[in-house]
Amino acid sequence: MTTTARQSDFSPLAAAEMILRQGLKQAAGAVQLASSFSVEDIVLIDLIQRWQLPIGIFAIDTGRLNEETYEVAEAVVSHYKVKIDWYFPQAQAVEALEREKGLFSFRESLENRHECCRIRKTEPLVRALAPLSGWVTGLRREQGVTRSQVEAIEIDVAHGNIIKINPLIDWSEAEVWDYAKRERLPLNRLHQQGYPSIGCAPCTRAIQAGEDVRAGRWWWENPEHKECGLHRRKS
């Protein structure tokens, strides 16, 4: 599903607003932003507040986030006076995984990593999306090969055919950072330490100059595998 006008016909801000408003209209129900508190997500929170759009915020606490991520989450609540709906993995599933396979099984195989992500991230996401008609993400095509075919507005077949809204889809990294710095947004301190993409602490590292923005995510895997299941697409 695409918007009725090309995003390239608009400035980045105008395109993001058009996508958000059109996505809300298509969803015709409750919509929330899925926030990992990346710079993209903070930009979206700022835009949603700026335009006073009826979009809430939810986040998933995997139990293995960086301290800096919790700090910026609290800064967002304080700065924007917003409520964040937190979701957590099922305790019994986490306990069973760690008792059976230890604390770092996700580094042993792609299958094990997918299992950990399913327990800690995708299952809570299913619960978060269950009452919604649509969700907003900070996905950008520039972020890597796994996201190059993402559309501005999609029908999310993997999550019950709800509307998936990607307002920053055509923004460059420079445009994201220009906005964040201009508006002095509260940002994750790890971004200044070489982390352009931030997930769970054991699965994220700083990148080197010239590396892909998602090179620090699951760095032991091939680029085409670097998704956790949150953004599954119909095969």
Image (cartoon, rainbow, N blue to C red):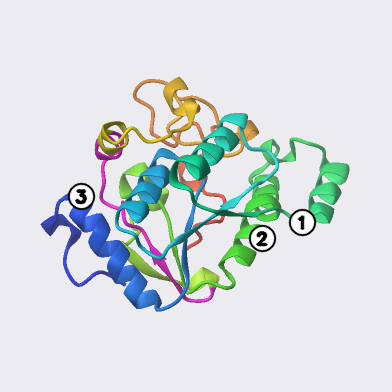
- Tell me, yes or no, whether the two marked residues, 1 and 2, touch with CB atoms within 8 Å: yes
Mark yes or no: residue 234 visible: no
- Residue 2, horizontal then vertical, whole percent: 27, 69
Q: Secondary structure at mark 3?
A: helix
Nearest to the observer: residue 55 or residue 61: 55
- Tell me, yes or no, whether the two marked residues, 1 and 3, touch with CB atoms within 8 Å: no
Residue closest to the far right: 99
* First to last magenta residue range: 160-177
Cα distance in 3D space between marks 2 and 3: 33 Å
The residue at 63%/37% (across/down) is: 65
Residue assigned mark 1: 90
Mark 3, Cα crowd under 10 Å, few <14 / some 14-19 / many 20+, is some
Identify the mark nearer the N-term, 1 or 3.
3
Instruction: Identify whether 206 is placed above or below 172.
Output: above
Mark 1, Cα crowd under 10 Å, few <14 / some 14-19 / many 20+, is few
Nearest to the observer: residue 232 or residue 37: 37
- Residue 87, horizontal then vertical, whole percent: 65, 55
Residue assigned mark 2: 123
Q: Secondary structure at mark 1?
A: loop
Question: For residue 185, what is the image quadrant?
Answer: top left
- Residue 56, horizontal then vertical, whole percent: 48, 60
Mark yes or no: residue 151 visible: yes
Nearest to the observer: residue 2 or residue 50: 50
Identify the mark nearer the N-term, 2 or 3.
3
Q: Secondary structure at mark 2?
A: helix
Horizontally, is 9 left or right of 143 in the view? left
- Residue 209, horizontal then vertical, whole percent: 36, 20
Disc 2 residue type (three-letter): Glu
Residue 12 is labelled as 3
Mark 2, Cα crowd under 10 Å, few <14 / some 14-19 / many 20+, is some
